[in-house]
Amino acid sequence: MVAIPLPYASAPGFRAQEGAGRLINCYAEPLGEGRTDAKRVRVPGMTSYLTSPATGFRGMFLESKSGILYAAFKNSLYKGTAPATPPGALIRIDSDPSPFAGTKSVYFARNNAATPDIAVVTENNAFIVTPAGFSAYPDPDLPVPNSVFGLDGYLVFTIADGRAFASDLNSTAINALSFGTAEAKPDGLVRGIPFSGRALFFGTQSLEIWIDVGAQPFPFQRSTVTPFGLIGPDAVAGWEDGWGAGLIWVANDYTVRQLDGYSAQKVSTPDLDRLIARDPAPQSLLASVHMVDGHAMWTISGSTFTWEYDITTQKWHERASWLTNRWRGLQTQNAYNLWLIGDRNGGNIYSIDPTNHREANDPLRMRVESGPVEKFPAHVRVARADFKLDTGVGIATGSEPIQTDPTVEISWSDDGGITWSNPLMRKIGRQAKTDKLIQVFRTGMSTPHGRRWRLDLSDPVYTAILAGDQSAELR
């Protein structure tokens, strides 16, 4: 018997035969001192929290003083509060035709006034939002902005031409001269965000980091410049409240980078770099963050993929919702002691829920694909294979049979992962029936490409995939 190389991270390769294994909708977690292996557990599901009839989610924002959550959708704006018993309902607060017309992301910010002013930038328009409604931004000295953030009591707006305007302290008033220009490179401004008490201004080719020096009329002064810009306005995350694991973005060189002091360290793998570079719309890449069971997850979604970086273990895995090749989850918000997330498929807001092994009503399939077991160029006869999973994980009071008597599907490939066998179904044990052995027999001869294994679990129960062994008789 030889060990089956189960991966700690996704490495699909440019072609399947180059791959070292994949983790889809699951991540690896070391088992602790005294053990050298790891468990692979399913990513959290999505549980309905606030509902609406809207479509086209564009962003949300929690005003922490009032506890009101604002959520923008295609052509509409809603508000809601923490429901006593989820799911609750979102209430529409704009009118038809809506000034919030559009489909692009909406950016929110607040100052530190006793009754905070909430600014919104959408499709190159600026508004002030209150629980009762909204109005156009009241100061005509503000040019047309493309993003907004709040820092030290100021509302800070970025302009595509490279200028950044700041309001007066805890006010919506703007001095026409209260601006600074990001001019290290002539690349304009794509997005502004607050991070670690600093103002970060992203252009297409550079990042300028400014600090609050209390100057007048513009309070910020440039501190340093980092030579990596932002590929698109939504391809950055890690500045959000409730998250302290670091700022990460997709840079103009099609790599993912993490801010380390004033330098930008590359954290992406060649497989992900390739996906980003070949995406048909890289300017539309969408990043988000959330925490799950102590793991800090930074997520990037493109046109045909979603990858997630576990900052805790510094490993990447993939996400894919049911019958798609990317995650349905969109931007996140830490609110009401939860991580909330918008939905690509409708107008509901969900909580990211590790106790739920579904995405809304859809299955959440976890998949582990191994690296090859090979002895190139020999053929190998595989008489049996054994897999170590948490067994006896059925739920006696759950849905029959997917929770009461859950099943894992096992398949294999002998051509480097190009084609796979029909899966064999193996039970992983009713509740407390931990004596189940997960085995397959007489699976034939592998080719010089070696034998790869695939384990799929769609049934909504918790389990962990720990290890595998197979016989390997040279022929």
Image: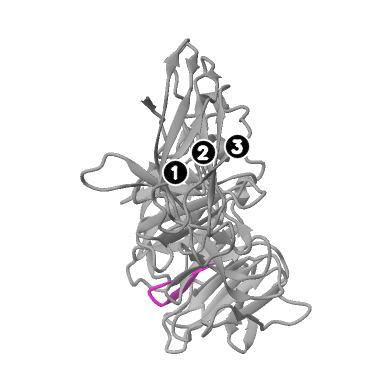
Residue 92: name its quadrant: bottom right
Report the disc number at residue 316: 1
Residue beneath disc 3: 423
> Would you name the residue on which mark 2 appears?
272
Above-or-below relation of 421 to 143: above
Q: How many marks?
A: 3
Are there few (<14), some (14-19), or many (20+) residues within 10 Å of tag 1? many
Find the residue positioned furthest to the right.
97
Can residue 175 be seen here? The reply is no
Helix, strand or loop for disc 3 = loop
Residue 298 x %, y %: 45, 53
- How far separated are the C-alphas under marks 2 and 3? 28 Å
Residue plotted at (51% across, 63% down): 356
In terms of depth relative to the viewer, which is nearer, 395 or 31? 395
Report the predominant secondary structure element of the magenta stretch: strand
- Marks 1/3: CA distance? 26 Å
* 43 vs 339, nearest the viewer: 43
Q: Are the residues at dot 2 and dot 1 in contact (C-beta closer than 8 Å)?
A: yes
